Image (tube, rainbow, N blue to C red):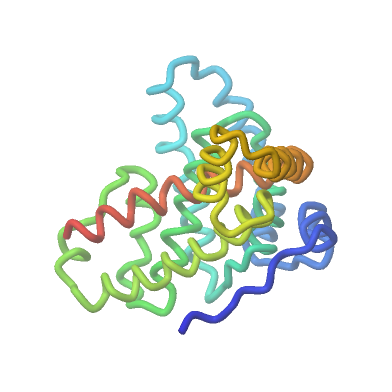
Amino acid sequence: MPIERTPLTSFQVKSAEKRIGIYHPIIRILETHEDELKKLYNSSLEAQETTDQQEFARVHLGFLADKIVGIDRFTLEPLEIIGIWSKVVEIFPASSYLRRSVASIITTTYMIQREDPSLSGFPKYYMENWQISPEILSDRDLVGRMQKRLGEINTSIEDIHSYIHDVKDPLQLGMKLQRRVQEEDTEAQVELDELKRIHIERTTPVLAESYENFAHPISIITIQLQNK
């Protein structure tokens, strides 16, 4: 039976966005290399085409992968992800490909924690190629452990998603309410309006971006591991 997750509170989330009480090794790395990362961001603005932006991230963020993979161990609880992403957004205020690459590095590094040191190159390789090597895919036990850790990250970002919408499955609930509205159920319209109000009130760039950017590599890697 799954363990019931404690819902995030507004106070916790707002504090995490300000990084109050959030002390995480990834945040320390981002702070240590902030000047270098901001220079990269400014240079990335010259890349006009999508393919140029992708190539820029692929070529220039390898050093960050090396730094993060050097962390012994770390957790990725919901509030920690929010704190980390608030720093990422500060450094890369308008670069989807750099942000997405950072999310990929963090995700894949978490997936190989406590594994053989020979896997330390995987986060950089994945960020550069968005592919998993046949050697990894052929190891059923390793794939199983990676899937488990990927699931842990997904649980954390789903907690963030649930906070934004104030329900665990906003899409399903929204569809049910919409059907009731079409049947002229006035109470359903009130509930739907309240869900929309809460979503607007709670959504911030950090929360929306953290969910979107981590969901992207999680969905791709999940498919790749399942199709091994």
Count of marks placed on residues: 0
The residue that appears at 39% across and 56% down in the rendered structure is: 123
The residue that appears at 79% across and 58% down in the rendered structure is: 19
Task: Give coordinates of residue 138: x percent, y percent.
Answer: 14, 68
Nearer to us in this view, 221 or 185: 185
Q: In this view, does 212 lie to the left or right of 90?
A: left
Nearer to us in this view, 14 or 89: 14
Task: Give coordinates of residue 212: x percent, y percent.
Answer: 53, 43
Check the picture and name the quadrant holding the C terminus: bottom left
Residue 79, image quadrant:
bottom right
Vertical relation: 160 (above or below) 178 = below
Vertical relation: 159 (above or below) 141 = above
The residue that appears at 81% across and 58% down in the rendered structure is: 10
The residue that appears at 58% across and 21% down in the rendered structure is: 45
Q: Can residue 204 be seen in this view?
A: no
Vertical relation: 57 (above or below) 26 = above
Residue 132, image quadrant:
bottom left
Vertical relation: 181 (above or below) 104 = above
Task: Give coordinates of residue 50: x percent, y percent.
Answer: 42, 21
Q: Is residue 126 left or right of residue 87?
A: left
Q: Can residue 9 be seen in this view?
A: yes
Q: In this view, does 155 lie to the left or right of 136?
A: right
Task: Give coordinates of residue 4: x percent, y percent.
Answer: 59, 78
Nearer to us in this view, 210 or 44: 210
